[in-house]
Image: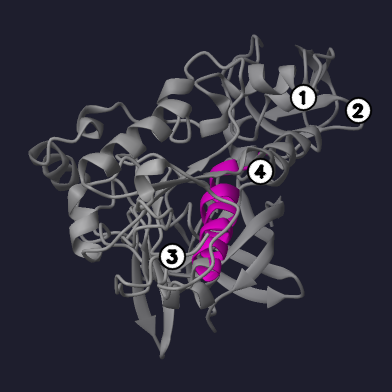
Amino acid sequence: MTVDSTMPAPPVAVVGLGQLGGSLAAALVGAGRQVSGWDVDPAARTAQGRLRLRYPVQGKPLKALYLRAAPNAVGVTLRLWLDPQGPDAERACCSPESVIAARETCHRLGLPHVTLDLREEFRRAVVTPFVRGYERGETPNPCVACNGGFRFAELLAFVERAGCERLATGHYARIVEREGRRLLARAADPAKDQSYMLARLDPAALERVWFPLGDQDKAATRAEAERAGLAAAGRAESQEACFLAGDDYRTFLGRHGLAARPGAVVDREGRALGTHDGYWRFTPGQRRGLGLASPEPLYVLGTDTAANAVVVGPREQLARRRVSARGRLYADVDRVEAKLRYRSPGVAAAVVAQDGGFVLELDEPAYGVAPGQAAVLYEGDAVVGCGVVSSAADH
């Protein structure tokens, strides 16, 4: 199918991926370009069957996001895989309900809408590695793999095929210049900052990316949506990985191949203290759910997958000062602020690049460092490196 070449439009794509938006993406379809393989709803076509040119937006779109982008847009929703047995799929950002809401909002604003059905691709790229990571005894972060990896790869591929020059999303993040190079940076609102989740995004792609909401806070965004009369303004936010569909990740893993298997809970010396029903149910730093009677609080230090054992100890044994990660540095740095879990505070550290990754020497010990989690490195507000924790030691 061809695009109506009689309607000029700047080559820009807009994608709203913030929590007020679900998976509604926007991508400008360039005049005269061939576009095939996408499910385009009838409202996106002219009477002659051609696509109307518009600037697109992803998510439960904000009117302001469209208006700041350009007058021409086309809405694009990523439909991703959800666990059909999850109890609350409606809250997921990529649920069928979100797809419908995105389409209705686009039509209300006079914009066409396109749905990209990526359910199987998403399952292979994000869900299966999530399950396999827990099987290996890791604690993977699927939201980092999805947002900075899978989603942007698919959206930028769409933009390239459609002949666009750039892509705008509703993430709460910013882009800054450092020594002539663009880098991802924290949003103005620290409470909603999503730079950690986006840290895998290759800086080379930032020339084609725009975050129009990065300089405002969530309250302003919600108020703007309310003034525009958008239903998404009052929608509850999803707090877990979208594909869990409102379920607990342990229940999900049990349904997807990780069977309950009794094993021992031991201390560092190997002394048996209790039992568990699956090592993959536990992560470093966890205190609840151990079922142990002890004169002092005990925490999960790690797991031994070969022995099907969970290793526990007092909090001081959780301290880690040296962290190795698979990944890359985006800038020439030797001192960074390292964020080793999404909700953990950053820790000042020295960093040394190595083949395939980097090593951090932390100024102060970090607690609950888990293999499989993302290690995101900052210099000021700028993201200067990202990797996946492979190991951690107390010296």
Residue 279 numbered mark, or none: 1
352 relative to 4, above or below = below
For the point 19% across and 49% down, the residue is: 63
| Mark pair 3, 2: CA separation | 60 Å
Q: Which residue is mark 4?
A: 126
x and y, in percent, of residue 101 in the image: 33, 32
Magenta span has 155?
A: yes
For the point 23% across and 56% down, the residue is: 66
Q: Which residue is mark 2?
A: 307
| Disc 2 and disc 1 in contact, CB within 8 angstroms | no
| Mark pair 3, 1: CA separation | 54 Å
Q: Amino acid at mark 2?
A: Ala
x and y, in percent, of residue 241 in the image: 53, 34
Q: Nearer the viewer, mark 3 or mark 4?
A: 3
Q: Is residue 160 visible?
A: yes
For this view, does 267 lie left or right of residue 27? right
82 relative to 108, above or below = above
For the point 35% across and 44% down, the residue is: 43
Q: Which mark sits nearer the N-terminus, 3 or 4?
A: 3
Q: Which mark sits nearer the N-terminus, 3 or 2?
A: 3
